[in-house]
């Protein structure tokens, strides 16, 4: 299959993409969080194609993207008042709501579940594509299952060239980390996946919110099943072994520098994930800066790109500094810990 690559800066690209979606094809497109791999959400056969292209287990449901808040009514069997309140506050934006699915939504899209995940993305290209095609777009993150999510069209092409119909190139995404997934089918809403809409932000609007216990790092060895099927798989993994080093900044730097030196003696290449503030502190490693600690948003934005870059640089192992798990830091550390398979070195 030839994968068409089109810039999202002209109307012909949208017309072409819309047609592909209407005919049951797959188009990757940018959202404000990460690129999505889109297809018709109301066609169960299309969901199969998405799973196949991603190499994703078919029990892992897809998020349905809409362009207008009221379109929730078509996808959910029942929309509780608090869903409208959340939509008013956070849509368009990086919040995905889980609601009971309507009959229209095929089990192919929901991975066999009675619930559906819905989100209205805050990106002009995504919104225009949904509107132009007149289709509710089911889209998981546009990466091969287990690889870091794509924050640039180049990442999508790297993973899907020849496997999907089109990539709509809208440049680099704004946020870099996938949406917050919130389950509204429970009495108290449950965060199934942390994202840029934080627990505090949700609590301010709705009152009590809990986090799915199964996704907390302290429970990683307990036999708990995450309620978002996607959270149980090893994810975002770079090819080299990644270890997070946590503790006092100076000790972290000493430890990483020691590892770099030991590895050099063995002829091994060490990657380092650091920030603007600390990048001068490392000697002899392949040092990559993901953003500034002063602005957490820049770190979220840079994370997946750097993980992918390390695959190309063929480093033998990677050490990452850690980040404070407040507001957005929680989502950042959630992704980093998963990428590291929870390998954390406390110094
Ligand atoms: O930011 C995002 O959410 C991106 C962009 C493209 O919108 N999409 C994304 O999709 O990250 P994906 O498929 O990579 O992750 C969706 C997550 C998975 O962990 C999945 O298991 C969970 O949402 N999910 C989807 N539907 C669900 C449902 N009905 N019940 C529980 N979890 C669900
Ligand atoms: Mg994903």
Image: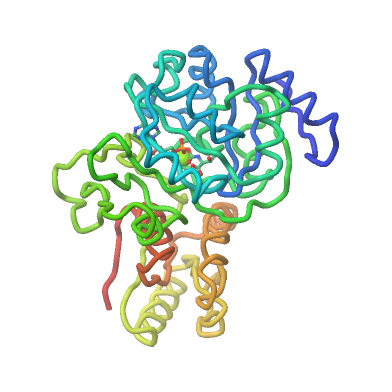
Q: Quadrant of residue 36?
A: top right
Q: Is residue 14 left or right of residue 206?
A: right
Q: Position of residue 194 (x, y in %)?
A: 38, 52
Above or below 7: residue 274: below
Say which residue appears at 54% left-offset and 73% top-offset. Answer: 295
Return the residue nearer the eye: 91 or 191: 91
Whole-percent x, y for residue 65 in the image: 55, 33
Q: Residue pushed farthest left?
A: 222
| Coordinates of residue 195 in the picture (x, y in percent) | 43, 53
- Number of numbered markers: 0
Q: Where does residue 152 sit, x and y in percent of width and height? A: 66, 48
Viewport quadrant of the C terminus: bottom left
Colour theme: rainbow
Furthest toward the bottom, the residue is 250
* Figure check: 304 above or below 68: below
Along the viewing direction, whichever of 20 and 263 lies nearer the viewer: 20
Q: For this view, does 153 lie left or right of residue 216? A: right
- Dividing the image into four equal quarters, which quarter contains ligand 1? top left
Quadrant location of the N terminus?
top right
Q: Residue at x 56, y 37 (%)?
A: 142
Front in this rendered view, residue 300 or 184: 184
Q: Please tell me whether residue 313 is drawn above or below residue 244 in the rendered image.
A: above
Query: Hey, which quadrant is residue 322 in on the image?
Result: bottom left
Q: Which residue occupies 73% across, 41% down?
A: 169
């Amino acid at each position: 299959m030839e994968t068409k690559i089109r810039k999202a800066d002209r109307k012909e690209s949208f017309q072409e993409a819309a047609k592909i979606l209407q005919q049951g094809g797959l188009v990757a497109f940018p959202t404000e969080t990460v690129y999505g791999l889109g297809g018709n959400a109301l066609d169960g056969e299309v969901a199969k194609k998405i799973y196949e292209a991603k190499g994703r287990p078919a029990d892992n449901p897809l998020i349905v993207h809409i362009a207008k808040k009221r379109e929730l009514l078509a996808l959910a069997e029942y929309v509780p008042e608090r869903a409208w309140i959340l939509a008013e506050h956070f849509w368009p934006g990086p919040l995905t709501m889980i609601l009971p699915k309507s009959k229209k939504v095929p089990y192919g899209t929901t991975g066999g579940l009675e619930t559906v995940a819905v989100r209205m993305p805050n990106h002009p290209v995504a919104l225009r594509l949904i509107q132009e095609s007149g289709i509710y777009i089911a889209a998981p993150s546009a990466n091969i299952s287990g690889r870091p999510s794509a924050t640039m069209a180049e990442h999508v092409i790297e993973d899907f060239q020849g496997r999907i119909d089109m990539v709509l190139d809208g440049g680099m995404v704004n946020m870099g980390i996938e949406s917050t997934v919130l389950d509204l089918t429970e009495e108290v809403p449950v965060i199934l996946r942390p994202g840029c809409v934080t627990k505090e932000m949700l609590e301010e609007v709705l009152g009590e919110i809990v986090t799915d216990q199964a996704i907390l790092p302290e429970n990683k060895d307990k036999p708990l099943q995450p309620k978002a099927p996607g959270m149980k798989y090893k994810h975002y993994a770079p090819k080299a072994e990644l270890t997070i080093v946590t503790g006092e900044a100076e000790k972290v730097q000493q430890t990483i520098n020691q590892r770099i030196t030991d590895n050099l003696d063995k002829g091994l290449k060490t990657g380092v994930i650091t920030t603007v503030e600390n990048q001068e502190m490392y000697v002899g490693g392949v040092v990559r800066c993901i953003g500034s600690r002063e602005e957490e948003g820049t770190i979220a934005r840079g994370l997946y790109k750097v993980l992918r870059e390390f695959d190309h640089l063929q480093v033998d192992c990677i050490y990452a500094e850690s980040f404070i798990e407040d507001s957005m830091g929680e989502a950042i550390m959630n992704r980093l810990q998963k990428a590291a398979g929870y390998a954390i070195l406390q110094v």
